[in-house]
Each structure stands twice: as C-alpha cells, then as structure tokens.
Image (tube, grey):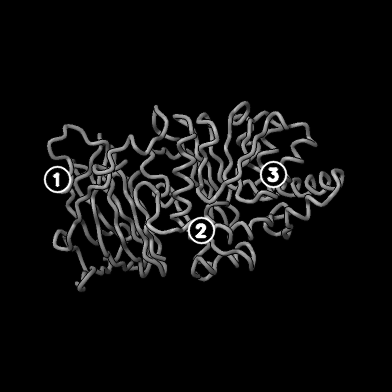
Amino acid sequence: MANSERLDGRQDGSAFAELDRYRDKWREAPLGSDTDGRMFSSDLLAMSDEKLLAAWDAMAGRRYGGEIGWLGPLYFDTFRASHVLELGSGLGFDGIRFAEAGALWTFADIVPDNLDVIRRIACLKGLSDRVRFHLIDDDLSFSALPADYDVIWVFGSIHHVPFEIARKEALEALSHLKPAGRWMELVYPRERWLREGAPAFEEWGKLTDGERTPWAEWHDIEKVRRRLFPAPFRTVLDFEFCSHNYRWFDLQYASDRPFRLDDFDVDLLSRETVLSNASISLKAGARRTLKAQSFRCPAGLFAPAAELDLAGAIRGLQGDRAFLPGIAVDIDCTVDRGSVGFGLVDVAGAYLPGAETVVESGPDSRRVTLRATAGDLPSKLIIRNLRSGCRSAFTMRSAAVRIAG
C-alpha cells in the first residue's frame, strides 16, 4: 500500500474516511479470548442489567484466566492511582479490572456501543467515579482529554488499521502522556504472519480475527518506534508469548517534558546520509546487481559478510555541531536464507552487542534500524552470518545514517 505519511502524521489524502469500515467490524468483540467466539456490543446492550453483568463477568473471567492472565499481577501495583488512557477499549475487560484495583481509566474507542457497554458495567460495579469515556471520531483527536496520563494502553487495537492511520492516532494521543510515562502495547508479531502464509494485510485480518476484519499488520519494536517517531522511548519490556502469537511492548517516554511535535527540529531529524553501494567493503561471495547488492555469507557462525564505514557519514551529519543526540542506521534488506546479524563497531574496534539486530529469512523486505547513543558513536556497520552450518544469503537495497530522535 502506498504510504503518503508525513513526519507530522498527517496525510496527503483522506485516509480517515474509511474508518466506518473498522467501526462496523469492531462493534463485535472476543468473548474473553480469541478462541471463545465473538459477540456484538449492541446485543449485550439489549440485555437486562442482571444478564449483562453475568455475561460480562463470565467473559472477563475467561480473559483473566487465559493467555494474558499475567497482565494483572504484573501491573496492578504500577496502575494503582495512575491515570491510564486506553486506545481501542473493546468491551473494557482490562480497564475495569485495573479500575477495581485502583486505576483511573479512560476508555477510548471508535464504536459508541462498546463505550455504552463499559459505561453500564462500570455503573453496575460501582466504578463510575474511576472511569471516563472518549469516542474516537474521524479526526482521531484527543483534544477533549487532559494531558496528565501516566500510561497509554494499546491492547491489540491500532495494529488493525493501516500504519499511517495508526501513526496519526498515536501522535495525537502522545501529547496527553506525562513525561516519563509509559506506552504499553500488544501486537501480532512477524513470526505469526510468516507462519500463516505472509498474506496481504487486507487478508491477514480474516485469519487472525474473523471474516469481517478489514486489516491486520505485524509489528516489531522498530515498527512501533517508527509509528511513535519522533517521540523518544526506552524499552522496558519486549517479548513474544503464546507460541509467537502475540508480542508485548512496555516503553517509557524518555523526556522530561510533554510531547509536542512542534518542539522537534523536523529538518534536523529528517536529515540523513545515504550510503552508496560503492562504500560497501565486500568480504566474500558478493555479486553486484543494478539496484542492490546480494551477498552469500562465508561459512561459519559469526563469519562477517560485509562492512560499511560510517565515520564519514556521521561527520557529515555532525557538521559544526559539538554534540549529536545519537545516530540511527536504517537498512532495507531481504534475507533469502539463514540468519543475518546487523551490528555496530565503535571507534576502538569493539563490537556493540546491544545494538545488533538479527533478521531471519523470509519473503518480505525488512527495514532494520540500529541505534547508538552520543557517547558510543560507531565507526562501522558489520553484517555477519548467524546460522551455524549455513551460508546465509541476503540482499541490501539501501542504507542510510540519520540523527536519531
């Protein structure tokens, strides 16, 4: 799908006119977990208070006792007396659970009936003073909400819209997060997408969430960071669970002031130095193509296949500035066989293991981003074989160095 995204998250076209498609889908919600079937929120609203509460409690019990039951014990203390904004609240299972434990929770959703179900449940449970509600309209604005949230909670919701729409929503919500606040998100990982045949995102949603689902898109940590860019985040947790069906991110907003897009030097953050094929020092098995370079790694675990000198590019970015906040190296590649590690080497020749990213073979082109802080700027990018007994193969289409946000 063509991406008309700009740095400010706005679109050149009217991408948000299609939100009605997503509203029509997400007026149905899982009855606890993905294996329990689904129900329309309008059908729940038609029930008496007694039947609604019994049905909701049964669904919530299955959710709490299933594959994500660990969320409560992990975050009960974190959320006690905290202000939490949830994007895509569904039937409110998580928010009600944490509100009962002391959280102050704002449910935001694109479906009015979903919010009406949660409103009734909160009232029946005596939680009306601990919750508030926000209907997400086509403009994806959160301007009616305060700017004092400790946490933004995104549980399997905005990965169900295309990246540029999710980015617009994320940037709008971020201005309501406190300094050092947390962004917590559940997504579907790339491993699940590959296992299920690597379908188009328009088709994959039908496999993950039913026939009426218009979109599902895999995410990894760098894809989430690109969606939140230029807001700076530190990773608290990043792991997959439930047989690679889900991935959980817990990120901390790494700033001492609230996020405002206008506070960032857009020109500076957009500046990059493109590394040409001519700057690549070949190790073994390289063969040139017109637009890319393909490599077959030498035999042996950790055997280097190629390196790129970054020193000149970094000096070009730095110019007359005495200080760089950090740099990012963006690589577009395809790994055709085996596993390849992309890593950085500092000026003393020491490998920086914390900066390495491992890419497994797969059918799609990957964008790999490596990051280095101001105090640990690299001199080279090293690409090496990470599959024992296999001469991994990969193709590099482009590489660029930029100032990290």
Residue that appears at 19% across and 46% down: 379
Between the C-alphas of marks 2 and 3, the distance is 29 Å
Label 3 or label 1, whichever comes before in sequence order: 3
Amino acid at the residue labelled 1: Gly
Closest to the camera, between mark 2 and mark 1, is 2
Amino acid at the residue labelled 3: Phe
Residue that appears at 38% across and 60% down: 3
Task: Tell me the element at label 3.
Answer: helix
Q: Is residue 80 above or below residue 325?
A: above
Pinpoint residue 298: horizontal percent, then vertical percent: 26, 66
> What numbered label is drawn on residue 17?
2
Mark 2 touches mark 3? (CB < 8 Å)? no
Query: Is 371 or 383 nearer to us in this picture?
Result: 371
Amino acid at the residue labelled 2: Ala
Label 2 or label 1, whichever comes before in sequence order: 2
Pinpoint residue 174: horizontal percent, then vertical percent: 46, 39
Which quarter of the picture shows residue 81? top right
Q: Is residue 397 above or below residue 118?
A: below
Q: Which residue is mark 1?
A: 316
Please state the total of marks drawn on the protein image.
Answer: 3
Residue that appears at 67% across and 57% down: 34
Residue that appears at 62% across and 62% down: 209
Between the C-alphas of marks 3 and 1, the distance is 51 Å
> What numbered label is drawn on residue 237?
none
- Lateral position of residue 258 relative to residue 89, left or right: left
Query: Is 216 or 347 nearer to us in this picture?
Result: 216
Q: Which residue is mark 3?
A: 93
Task: Tell me the element at label 2.
Answer: helix
Task: Tell me the element at label 1.
Answer: helix
Query: Is 14 or 199 nearer to us in this picture?
Result: 14
Pinpoint residue 221: horizontal percent, then vertical percent: 43, 49
Pinpoint residue 210: horizontal percent, then vertical percent: 64, 65
